[in-house]
Image (tube, rainbow, N blue to C red):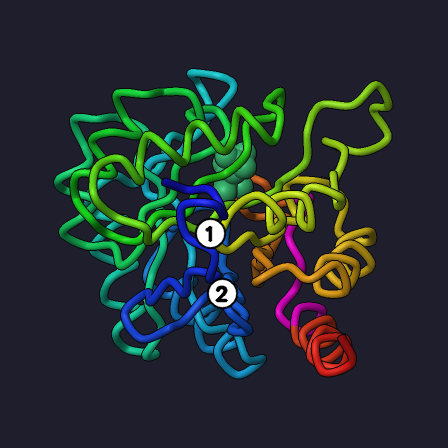
Amino acid sequence: LASREAHPQPTVVDVAGTKIGGGHLGMIAGPCAVESEERMNDIAAAIKAAGANLLRGGAYKPRTSPYAFQGLGEEGLKILRRVGDAHGLPVVTEAVDPRHVELVAEYADMIQLGARNMQNFVLLTEVGKTHKPVLLKRGMAATVKDLMMSAEYVVAQGTTDVVLCERGVKGFDNACRNMLDIAAVPQIQQISHLPVIVDPSHATGRPELIPACALAAVAAGADGVHIEVHNCPEEAMSDGPQALLPEQYAEVMGQMKKVAAAV
Ligand code: PEP
Ligand code: MN
């Protein structure tokens, strides 16, 4: 159902008014985690002014260590919803547990399925059943074919509102957090009608490498770019070292628009 054969025309996913695919770029930005309403408001105002059209922020964080900050939970969902509404930005947030899916669907315009859960088939099915737009991230050790099969789990529940996200895979070089597979973009577009976006933040883990990778994504024909932005990265509760400052985000947005106009 997610293949080009099933559906030759590209799918345009509508996330509460923000279109992704078929020439519409989904520009997702925001902090890794929702931390406070004040901080969320400042970041939302900045990314909106820069031209982003979707606000992200995790309320449930999948952390490598059980002792690391796990997110604000429902309070985080409430903050994200209020801030998104205040700035006219649809919101995307991750569900990590099938038991939270209903609650997340009450607040989110788009539900993120993270890299670590790409093959959590029970979670994929529960999120698919909500018929909310889905952002499905590629697992760090998943092939493009694995990603397509995971998308199939969601689409099988009766929705084609699924956006795929290349966010880097495990490489042999630890210079970067992951290794960005830019070829996955045209590869997915060849075999699937679903939009595909790129997340250079988790792919590189290094802010100074994000602009070049974001531009490469747009040049490769991606249907959007997902970037983590924080106004005080040294104080961030998660993924601070890879966050762009709002002014850096505004600069790369300007460059991405030029590349998009040229391709
Ligand atoms: C995130 O978007 O903050 C996240 C945890 O991403 P990933 O699942 O790609 O690691
Ligand atoms: Mn993150």
Asked if disc 2 and disc 1 are in contact, CB closer than 8 Å, the reply is: yes
Q: Earlier in the sequence, mark 2 or mark 1?
A: 2
* Mark 1 lies within 8 Å of ligand 1 (Cβ measured): no
Foreground of the two, 98 or 3: 3
Find the distance from the CA under tag 2 to the CA under tag 1. 8 Å
Judged by its main secondary structure, the magenta piece is helix
Q: Which residue is mark 2?
A: 21
The location of residue 245, given as percent across then percent down, is 66, 64
Asked which secondary structure carries label 2, the reply is loop
Residue 243 is a magenta residue: yes
Quarter-wise, where is residue 263 in the image?
bottom right
As drawn, the label of residue 194 is: 1
The location of residue 249, given as percent across then percent down, is 66, 69
Q: Which quarter of the image is occupied by the N terminus?
A: top left
The location of residue 17, given as percent across then percent down, is 31, 75
In this rendering, is residue 115 above or below 166? Answer: above
Foreground of the two, 174 or 11: 11
Foreground of the two, 229 or 2: 2
Quarter-wise, where is residue 214 in the image?
bottom right
**Given the image, on which type of amino acid does mark 1 rest?**
Leu
- Indicate left or right for 110 with 145 as reference: left
- Indicate left or right for 210 with 166 as reference: right
Quarter-wise, where is residue 204 in the image?
top right
Q: Which residues fall within the magenta stretch?
A: 241-249
